[in-house]
Amino acid sequence: MNSAFIIGQYIPGESFIHRLDPRTKISLIFFFVIFVFFANSVLSYALLTIFSFLVALSTKIKPSFIIKGLTPVWFLIIFTFTIHLIVTQEGEVLYRILGFPIYSGALIQGFSISLRFFLLILFTSLLTLTTTPIEITDAIESLLNPLKKIRLPVHELALMMSISLRFIPTLMQETDKISKAQASRGVDFRSGSLKSRVEAVIPLLVPLFISAFKRAEELAMAMEARGYRGGEGRTKLRELKIRKLDYLAMILFSLVIAGMFLLRK
């Protein structure tokens, strides 16, 4: 398992989360993304954080693998926190760094926004870790099925989203491979002026784009050779069914969200 970037990867398993209907997982994640922005107290954030970690542990995927896979996201989280420290000027001045004032409101807002961002990334990553691309495609198509009445190409849209998720780890691996090959040829990505660093990235981007287009062309040819013509008249190997396990997950999620609202200020 390549843990450099976990978004888009699928880890086989028989956990409680793995056995949930993919429509249930997508729906719960959708509502989690909405309700996480309603948390506004320490206790409400603590409840959502504990719930997210418990869900991650219930997948029976090694915590070290998940944490290491989220490493590329930490830069964005730290950047978000730093921006709030600089921009927000609310509350009392706690201390100064090189003469720059740090306000209490900046710390609170920066921490809350960064924590929200982390929980969103963690919770949504669990979808691809516990759900195959085919299941995601079928679930999205099923959830968007009412939009067929307005002639929206639901099947094609779901397929494109699934393929995009599937190719994220592939492109990350390709980027790592190309960067190591360019570094062995003497290309330096980490030192020098900003202009030289930008110029050094070009030998990385060109082969990456060529590889991406080549993979897309090969995939299109493979689908055409297998007679793919869209969703019309297609049958499915596995029919999606909502079971007692899914209702239990919905009840537990509802209780957590209800508790979060009760713990709000």
Image (tube, rainbow, N blue to C red):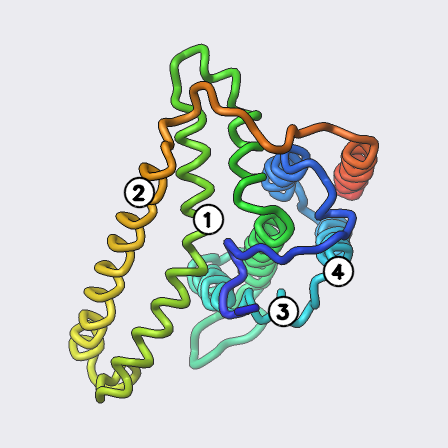
Residue depicted at 66% across the width and 39% down the height:
25
Name the foreground residue: 255 vs 95.
255
Q: Which circle marks residue 5 in the picture?
A: none
Crowding around mark 3 (Cα neighbors within 10 Å: few <14, some 14 to 19, many 20+) is some
Q: Which residue is mark 4?
A: 60
Residue depicted at 41% across the width and 67% down the height:
173
Amino acid type assigned to the residue bearing label 1 in the image: Leu
Q: How far apart are the alpha carbons under marks 1 and 3?
A: 19 Å
Q: Of callouts 4 and 2, which one flags the residue occurring earlier in the amino acid sequence?
A: 4
Q: Which residue is mark 1?
A: 165
Q: Which residue is mark 2?
A: 220
In the rendered image, residue 101, in percent from the top left (x then y), is placed at 48, 70
Amino acid type assigned to the residue bearing label 4 in the image: Lys
Vertical side of 164 occupied by 99: above or below: below
Name the foreground residue: 31 vs 114.
31
Q: How far apart are the alpha carbons under marks 4 and 2?
A: 35 Å
